Every structure is written in C-alpha cells, then in structure tokens.
Amino acid sequence: MSLPVSNNTHGLCNVRDEYPNIYVIHIKSCISKEYHYKVLRLGYYPSHIKMTKKTTVNGVCYSIPTNYMIRLNISRVEATCLTEYQFNEKVKFIINWVSNNNKEESVVSEQFASYAAQLFLEKL
C-alpha cells in the first residue's frame, strides 16, 4: 500500500508499505534518499505505554512497543533497530550494525529514536 506523499519542513516523504517491508523515499533540497525497512518482530505493548514525540505542529504520536525490531538498509549498511522498555519505564532505542572493518557497533539512546539514528549516522 502506498501512502500519500507528505510535505513538511523536513522535505517530501513517500512511504510504500508492503508489510513486512516498508520502502521510504525522502527528498530534501533536491537530494533523494531511499530507505528499506523490514519488520523482524512486532513486539508488544507493556501496561505503561510511551508515545513518540510530534515532529511538526500537526504531527502524529505513535505508541512505542517493546521488543519491536526492524532491519534497515541505509548508506549500504544493514542495521538492526530494537526498542526495549527499562525498569524505570524509559524506552531504550538500540541500533546494531557491523562496520566496514567487521567490528560489531552499537548506539543507544533513552531519549528518542531519532537521537539514536543521529548517533548511528555520525558513526558511518
């Protein structure tokens, strides 16, 4: 199922959902980036659910499951992304991948998924 193209301050984004595969094309400043996600595990919702933060005024918040796992291909790197609820009810966002020198790498954030993604991209 192809979702409508969204236009916001972060550029244009087109999402094609073919569960368990999700294809995203993001265009900003005439630069196109393509991402492919594969849902490996849906996880479950604990009794105290955390929500994502709005990225725009009219943005949508989503419930965050625990043990949700996806595989992401970005910049020719395959990474595994995972959510884990902690005992303090915070959500840990974890990204694991193998670097060019075959070293296992990982970044973690208890703040936001986007911060974990930012740390990941800085290490590439």
Image (cartoon, rainbow, N blue to C red):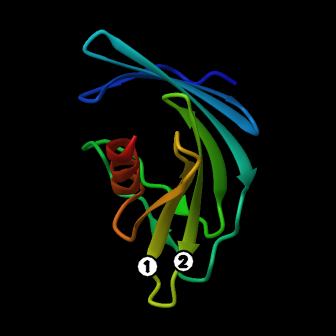
Extreme-top residue of the structure: 30
- Callout 1 secondary element: loop
Image quadrant where residue 19 sits: top right
Extreme-bottom residue of the structure: 87
Q: Position of residue 88 (x, y in %)?
A: 44, 89
Horizontal side of 82 relative to 20 (left or right) equals left
Horizontal side of 8 relative to 93 (left or right) equals left
- Check the picture and name the quadrant holding the N terminus: top right
Indicate which disc, 1 or 2, sits on the residue closer to the N terminus: 2
Q: Which residue is mark 1?
A: 90
Disc 1 + disc 2, Cβ < 8 Å = yes
Q: Position of residue 49 (x, y in %)?
A: 53, 74
Amino acid at pointer 1: Lys
| Foreground of the two, 2 or 29 | 29
- Callout 2 secondary element: strand
Amino acid at pointer 2: Tyr
Q: Which residue is mark 2?
A: 85
Q: Is residue 101 above or below residue 92?
A: above
Q: Position of residue 18 (x, y in %)?
A: 74, 29
Q: Position of residue 71 (x, y in %)?
A: 65, 45
